[in-house]
Image (cartoon, coloured by chain):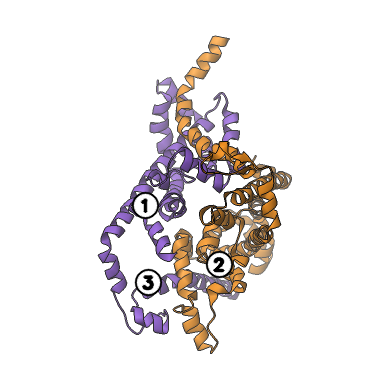
Chain colours: A orange, B purple
Amino acid sequence: MVLKAKNKFLGFLPVYIMALPGILYLIINNYLPMFGIIIAFKDYNVQKGILGSDWAGLKNFEYLFKTQDAWVITRNTILYNVVFMILGTICAITAAVLLNEVRQKFLSRFYQSVILLPYLMSMVVVSYLVFAFLSSETGFVNNTILAALGKEPISWYTEAKYWPFILTIVHIWKGIGFSMVVYLANIVGINKDYYEAAQIDGATKWQQIIHITLPSLKTTVITLTILAIGRIFYSDFGLFYQVPMNSGPLYITTNTIDTYVHRGLMELGDIGMSSAAGVYQSVVGFILIIVSNALIRKVSYEDALF
Amino acid sequence: MMTREDKITQAIAHAVMIFMSLCALIPFILLVIASFTDNMTAIRNGYSFFPEKWSLEAYRFIAREWQMMGRAYAITIIVTVIGTICSLFMTSTLAYALAKDGLPGRSFLMVFVVFTMLFNGGLVPTYCIYTKIFNIKNTLAALIVPSLLMNAFNIVLVRSYFKTNIPAAITEAAVIDGAGEFRIFFTIVMPLSLPILATIGLLIAIMYWNDWRNGLYYLTDPKLFSIQIILNKING
């Protein structure tokens, strides 16, 4: 019996060897940093290293939550995610429904490719595009649009109040191509018989969309929304760091947990505060994922992650 | 026969799609025209779609800096090619193990992989471990390895493709014919999985091509700057 078990294990040895590089990478890239979160509970000192530094208890967290920053970054991260979720879903579904009405295969392909283009660009390039429009001296908006309307130029990169709109537009502009294609794939998969039956009964296009197309997308929307709720403590670092060009006066509306952790680590050298914010993000994020997964299980069992 | 309603729907659909296509394209067109705009004209009138004076100065500048730009392009291409190949290889071999029926410890391995999607140490510990333990600063590996090389999402995707699209009968027949696991993987499983490998390969390649974060964290040596990192530096 023991021999048999051993043989069985040996028979699978090549499979284990194949899995080894991936396992090693996950240990280095994912599991070691998980233990590294003890940095947040230490008074980190470069000379003493991670393990050698003195324990600080919850002092880093105390400092973090005493600052105004903790509230601002939490509020920004959550509000942006909520707006992106709602507007992004509405725009993507509207676009997908309309794209589905385009009968010419070639044109449909063409529209998809062009609208997907921003999705393929790096955030650095996107930040250049935004700068070409919004730069206070040379920008297209100040020099052409506002000038034509006879309005005073606006110093976009120092006025925080405009940025919630700008970042939302950029986010949707960049991401809509991809989510539109995802929803289109769903719509194409809907059984055509429903539409034929509806047409025979004299349903208008609008009625078909409201009563057949949208209900068929319900599962996908719910699943994507719940996944997004699980990610509500995480933000697209590139969008919030590159597009506002790291401009200080804008932090009040552009700083999120990810950009805060980044600045703490790379620009201010405040490892304690930065790692405390990171742990705050990881732990709350983890709880939210568990909760949202429990929700998916309730809604549609087969869509649950685990 | 097109009804009146069909015609209206078609018109709206095309109008919205053309509008969205223009929104996607116009910023790029403005950027390209801006790159051909004379510097003085840009300062006086701002960027516009019809600049008064055109200029090739920006491109002459790049041509003068050809050594730096050429090097950066070479680094980007090397990183993208090596990164994509390694990533595809590691992702598919681990996914193969996860799809293997009867593998002892398979469910533990699955939890091990999926857990990385649920919880992560965050930026600070990752940074400390890569710089302090692995001394990755200012090496080419810094652009390839941290964060980008493999992710659990792709592993799960490839695994489910293996499970649904590779018939067990084929691999069983290969075993009877005396083929080992490596042989089965490289000559049967991989060729049959080309569609999914091409899809995630494309996404991985785009990710490597566009990455600037690893350069921001782990590089100070300009010799290793990729094209995105140079763009990022000019910008900041």
Q: Amino acid at mark 1?
A: Asp
Q: Nearer the viewer, mark 3 or mark 2?
A: 2
Q: Amino acid at mark 3?
A: Val
**CB atoms of marks 3 and 2 within 8 Å:** no
- Chain of the residue that carries numbered disc 3 in the rendered image: B
- Chain of the residue that carries numbered disc 1 in the rendered image: B
Task: Please name the residue that numbered disc 3 is placed on.
Answer: B32
> Which of these two is toward me, A96 or A190?
A96
Q: Amino acid at mark 2?
A: Gly
Q: CA distance from mark 3 to mark 2?
A: 29 Å
Question: x, y percentage for residue A304?
Answer: 66, 43
> Which of these two is toward me, A261 or A197?
A261
Examine the image and state in which quarter residue A214 appears. bottom right
Looking at the rendered structure, the secondary structure element under dot 3 is helix
> Which of these two is toward me, B149 or A253?
A253
Q: For this view, does A220 lie left or right of residue B188? A: right
Question: x, y percentage for residue A107?
Answer: 45, 66
Question: x, y percentage for residue A166?
Answer: 57, 70
Mark 3 vs mark 1: same chain?
A: yes
